[in-house]
Image: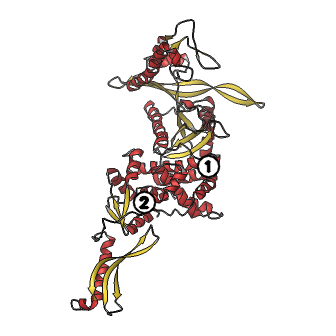
Amino acid sequence: MYLKKSKNNKTGRTYLYIADGYHDREKGYTKTVTVQSLGYLDVLEKQYDDPIAHFSEVVKQMNEEKKHQKLSVPMQISLNEKLELNTNNFYNFGYAALSKIFYGLEIDKFLISKFKSRNVSEYKINNIMKLLVFARCLFPDSKKSTFENKDIFFENTNFSLKEIYNALTYIEPYKDSLQSYIYDHIQEQYKPNNECIFYDVTNYYFEIDDNDDFRKKGVSKEHRPNPIVQMGLFMDSLGLPMSYGLFPGNTNDCLTLKPMVQKLQKNYSVGRVIVVADKGLNTGKNIIYQKAIGNGYVMSLSIRGANQELKDFVLNEDGYEYNQDKTYKKKSRRYPREVEYVKTVNGRSVKAKTTVDEKQVIFWSADYAKRAKAERQPAIDKARDLIGNVQKYNKKNCYGASKYVKHLVFDKNTGEIIEAKSQLSLDEDKIAEEEKLDGYYAIVTSEMEKTDSEIIDIYRGLWRIEETFKVTKSELDDRPVYVSTKEHIEAHFLTCYLALVLCRVLQHKIDKKYSVEKILDSLRQCNCSHIKNNYYLFNFFDDVLKDVGNAVSIDFSNKYMRLQEIKKILAETKK
């Protein structure tokens, strides 16, 4: 604000105002508004010895109070005022918390350093990546829709849709180096104990009919017929993402572990690690490789698919230790397990066997047993319905139920059910056999010195990575993917990975008090509307924003803020 002096050329009299200037974001230029009319200078001289000096001091004090938001600003509002066509006065401010993490991990410095020597605006690349990542967290959509709604953020978005697609091409070659760069910062700032790292695989389908060189039909986690890509993901002991990799959709889960470990140990400052994974990764080749490079492993082992000797050991009550209320038990043994693998001999792939000395930990939980029975029941109900209504089913739509039906035969060409000579019936023996093993889990490990409880606790950490995949598919909407070339698909998932990192780091900073879903929902609702001049009205504040704000030093509780103050807060997130 400033003291404005306006001289009337006809009368020669000078009128004093307290005025304020603001930048009209829609019009693109500065406007001046009168904050307070003071009167004619000759009249004021009768009240004050030096009116200009007096009111200059008043303005100075008002500006000081304004800095601390102690000033009440008079504002005239006309109820007849109309919105101009295509007006949008709605802005998000919640992304300021994400910006704090983005710059805290120095992602901007990586992008600027990689592109400043090329014929590409490094600052524009940084702004494009921020838009794609922040929008993926809060308003996930296609690149085109994200571009069309880019002005929802208080950021420099002086770029075109074509430049967004070009940025995907430019950033793709740096996907691996950016991951390791970010994780170096995570290690420095949050110091995870990476004795154990967690690995799992999921896949993402594409709404296309035919395969290409990358998107291929494979075993879909969602039982869809569409082409897919596979994603392997490493997570650290704090639940923070470490590294990911994409593979063609027809790649078996177990074949992704070796290249992912190789990338991790080449690009990351990690020594010996214990790889924790589910039974789908527990193959002879993976076990032998981990041992060969000095790593350890903790992996589950399928009991239902195991040999009879292991099943007998599991069901034998000898050696089990129970908890007080008999709802949980565990035991273990050191056992030489024979594993199969494929090796190359004279250019040919040959099956081979070897024996690995490992510890086997068995545990049973009453809750897990109840859950297994409940999960099986829909398939049994479906099997009963199939027996009574054969005409409704074929090989494709009786998934999960067919194994519980005796004498069920399918036509190899059509998949239709062939009426058997014997009447179809429910396989009660198979159901009873499965029920015996309900609630039992087997874990195999190279870590002989760790206690059974330690091994079980380590393995249970896998739930975090499973929950992480749910976050990517629900909150971040990694799919559907609206790009088609391999480099753009890779870049798309890189932006999704960056969004995931920001979410998980922010969640870690508030001690995992809230789920990612709840955090993003509150940041998404932290919006404001432009009301007049440079003033914005905020209409949402909750416990999540309070805790997030405390963690990242941002006050989300202000009901009113000037654009200058909003920009100052955003600027502070970039330091």
Q: Position of residue 366 (x, y in %)?
A: 38, 24
**What is the three-letter code of the residue carrying label 2?**
Asn
In the foreground, 193 or 9: 9
Pointer 2: what residue? 88
Residue ID at (32%, 65%):
80
Q: Position of residue 150 (x, y in %)?
A: 49, 57
Please give left or right for residue 421 compared with residue 537 in the image.
Answer: right
**What is the three-letter code of the residue carrying label 1?**
His
Task: Examine the rendering and report whether any part of residue 315 can be seen.
Answer: no
65 relative to 42, above or below? above
Label 1 with label 2: CB-CB less than 8 Å? no
In the foreground, 244 or 534: 534
Furthest toward the right, the residue is 346
Give the secondary structure at mark 2: loop
Neighbours of disc 1 within 10 Å: few (<14), some (14-19), many (20+): many
Question: Quarter holding the N terminus?
Answer: bottom left
Residue ID at (60%, 51%):
175
